[in-house]
């Protein structure tokens, strides 16, 4: 959540954060491909446009490093009052994904490994340095060390691809068997309540509400949680978050997914003393009810109601969640969640739509009707939220500092998550080529036309090429006879599309190969057999002149299936395949 990354900055002084920047300028200036980093600062009005444009024009690595250093130096000297905003921009999720160096800096700032107060006696403050440099020559160069790493080509400057399936793939993806990595790294310490920076306060959450718990106020029974500018007792913070049915703030309020109950039991937090009051009740008033509710909340009562809620959840039918992939919705959006790809809300692109793969947080942001959405409560599967799936351990959430491939921010790992892990046509793993426009991936021999790997470059699959071509092609309708009479040479892409659709739909590969060697007595009933590999061979060798002849061979497959199988399982399979083929044919040829 955002509070885990940003909240601690509110408790560091301007002087401390300026000192941190002063010590880390050289390290930050060595980041690869700094354009996105600088754009982030420019978009938040932290860097003047003229300085941004000057650095943007720099070409060599050394020039860029020097330019980034000058930008950071300018921020330190001219924008000290905005230093909190600077680090918030630098530590936003989409920036951390691109720059591992910044992720390391954030960690050192949060866990206390960087000593904020240790200052070398010879180091001048930014104000002192500016005063001493004011008399120096303006163009004086600064010497600093540069961190070397492998060059990484930017994809921002690539040319637009020619819409042709014959171009060559830019990404070859080795097939990987889906596997569950360990969620807890051996020896990893996630107990942030022991970190020095959290000595006086803790980031806490309850439902979708975030706040800061002040440790010294809690033992005194005072309002100790600050959220959205208001102070709350733990009980009323639970109510503010819409979790009043739980009536046990020790379980519903959490720090890094750890209930406060555990922190209290381990003596990291102190509860206020429990006062047992004797009441004389003449009549029940709203005021007394509220006091009883608050007192009961401090004691951690309300187990009867909470028990009923948990019992209802336990009675839910969990069998519908056992499949490896699950249908999910977010208001008007629909997608498929693949459980083995899930890591956290911002890591692991696990939700697939027709357009692309998304992390849960990215998926929610696609729904324009939600202004303040949260993936745990707004994404629904079989009537249950993802928060329910997490509680039931149907989804397993990775730790914040997990370094598995799903949680990795390396460019190659992020790119690998943009496409499917199995071939779109045969649904098998192996060495795959990935489309640069959609989430599909293919074996080179499964795609039509076959993909050649002899040179690098962007590649777009036939599905995307057809979609793009239909946007600029004449959209006038055709009759079925006009479509049958159309030359294959002008509609080869359409034929490729139809054949790929049938290959994909034939899940059990019943119609792929010649049935005569494997199906007993087939030749006794079928005099003219036909199969998909035979159609593919005829199409690629140029045997079809007209689209009608191409379609006729598909009709032959369907009629043979009906004749031989009648109304058994294979006969019904062929009927469904025929229905799908005819729908796709009419759609791509715009049949009236």
Image (spheres, rainbow, N blue to C red):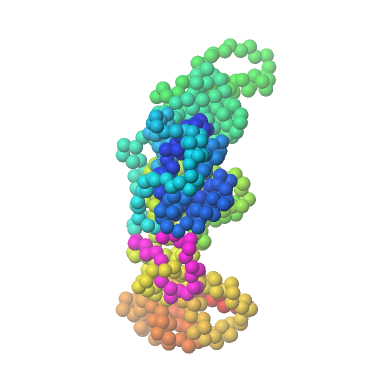
Q: Give the mark count.
A: 0
Q: In terms of secondary structure, what is the magenta stretch mainly?
A: loop
In the rendered image, the quadrant that contains the C terminus is bottom right
Q: Residue at x 46, y 69 (%)?
A: 460
Query: Does 294 lie within the magenta span?
Result: no
Above/below status of 305 relative to 24? above
Can residue 577 be seen in the rendering of this structure?
Answer: no
On whether residue 170 falls in the magenta region, the answer is yes
Give the magenta-colored segment's residue range. 153-175
As displayed, is residue 172 above or below residue 223?
Answer: below
Residue 432 visible in this rendered orientation of the protein:
yes
Q: Residue at the spot x=60%, y=33% of the render?
A: 228
Give the percent coordinates (x, y) of residue 158.
47, 65
Q: Looking at the picture, does residue 542 appear above or below residue 125?
A: below
The image shows residue 349, relative to residue 374, as above or below, that is below
The residue lying at 54 percent from left, 71 percent from top is 468
> Quick check: 351 left or right of 48?
left
Q: Is residue 522 left or right of residue 589?
A: left
- Of 516 and 18, nearer the camera is 18
State the image coordinates of residue 489 (x, y, percent, origin top left): 49, 84
Depth check: 416 or 9 in front?
A: 9
Residue 220 appears at what percent x and percent y?
Answer: 52, 17
In-front residue for pair 15/98: 15
Residue drawn at x 51%, y 81% as measured from the top left: 491
Left/right placement of residue 517 relative to residue 295 reads left
Q: Position of residue 340 (x, y in %)?
A: 40, 51
């Amino acid at each position: 959540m955002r509070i885990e990354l940003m909240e601690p900055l509110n408790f560091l002084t301007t002087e401390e954060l300026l000192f941190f920047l002063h010590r880390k300028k050289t390290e930050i200036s060595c980041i690869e491909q700094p354009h996105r980093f600088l754009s982030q600062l420019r978009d938040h009005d932290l860097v003047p446009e003229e300085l941004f444009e000057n650095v943007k024009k720099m070409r060599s690595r050394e020039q860029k490093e020097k330019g980034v250093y000058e930008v950071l130096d300018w921020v330190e000297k001219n924008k000290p009052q905005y230093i909190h905003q600077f680090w918030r921009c630098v530590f936003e999720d989409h920036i951390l994904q691109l720059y591992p160096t910044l992720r390391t800096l954030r960690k050192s700032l949060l866990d206390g490994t960087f000593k904020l107060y240790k200052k070398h006696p010879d180091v001048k403050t930014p104000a002192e340095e500016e005063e001493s440099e004011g008399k120096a020559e303006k163009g004086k160069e600064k010497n600093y060390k540069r961190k070397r790493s492998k060059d990484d080509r930017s994809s921002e400057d690539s040319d637009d691809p020619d819409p042709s399936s014959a171009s060559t793939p830019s990404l070859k993806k080795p097939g990987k068997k889906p596997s569950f990595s360990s969620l807890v790294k051996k020896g990893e310490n996630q107990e942030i309540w022991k970190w020095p920076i959290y000595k006086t306060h803790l980031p806490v959450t309850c439902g979708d509400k975030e706040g800061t718990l002040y440790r010294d106020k809690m033992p005194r029974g005072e309002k100790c949680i600050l959220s959205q500018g208001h102070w709350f007792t733990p009980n009323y913070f639970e109510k503010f978050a819409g979790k009043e049915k739980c009536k046990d703030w020790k379980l519903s309020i959490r720090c890094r997914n750890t209930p406060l109950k555990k922190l209290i039991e381990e003596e990291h937090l102190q509860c206020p003393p429990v006062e047992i009051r004797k009441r004389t009740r003449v009549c029940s008033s709203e005021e007394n009810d509220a006091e009883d509710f608050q007192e009961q909340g401090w004691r951690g009562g309300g187990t009867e109601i909470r028990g009923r809620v948990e019992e209802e959840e336990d009675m839910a039918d969990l069998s519908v969640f056992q499949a490896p992939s699950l249908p999910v919705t977010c208001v008007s959006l629909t997608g498929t969640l693949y459980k083995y790809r899930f890591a956290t809300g911002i890591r692991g692109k696990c939700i697939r739509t027709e357009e692309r793969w998304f992390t849960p947080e990215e998926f929610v942001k696609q729904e324009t009707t939600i202004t303040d959405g949260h993936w745990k409560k707004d994404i629904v599967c079989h009537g249950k939220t993802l928060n329910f799936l997490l509680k039931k351990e149907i989804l397993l959430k990775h730790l914040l500092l997990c370094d598995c491939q799903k949680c990795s921010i390396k460019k190659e790992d992020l790119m690998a998550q943009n496409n499917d892990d199995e071939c779109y046509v045969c649904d098998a793993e192996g060495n795959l080529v990935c489309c640069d426009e959609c989430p599909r991936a293919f074996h080179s021999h499964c795609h039509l036309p076959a993909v050649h790997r002899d040179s690098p470059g962007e590649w777009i699959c036939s599905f995307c090429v057809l979609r793009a071509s239909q946007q600029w092609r004449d959209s006038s309708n055709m009759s079925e006879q006009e479509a049958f009479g159309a030359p294959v040479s002008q509609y080869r892409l359409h034929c490729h599309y139809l054949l790929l659709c049938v290959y994909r739909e034939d899940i059990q590969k019943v119609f792929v190969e010649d049935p005569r060697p494997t199906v007993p007595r087939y030749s006794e009933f079928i005099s003219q057999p036909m199969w998909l590999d035979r159609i593919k061979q005829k199409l690629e060798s140029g045997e079809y002149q007209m689209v009608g002849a191409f379609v006729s061979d598909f009709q032959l497959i369907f009629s043979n299936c009906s004749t031989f199988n009648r109304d058994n399982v294979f006969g019904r399979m062929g009927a469904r395949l025929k229905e799908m083929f005819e729908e796709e044919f009419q759609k791509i040829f715009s049949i009236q």
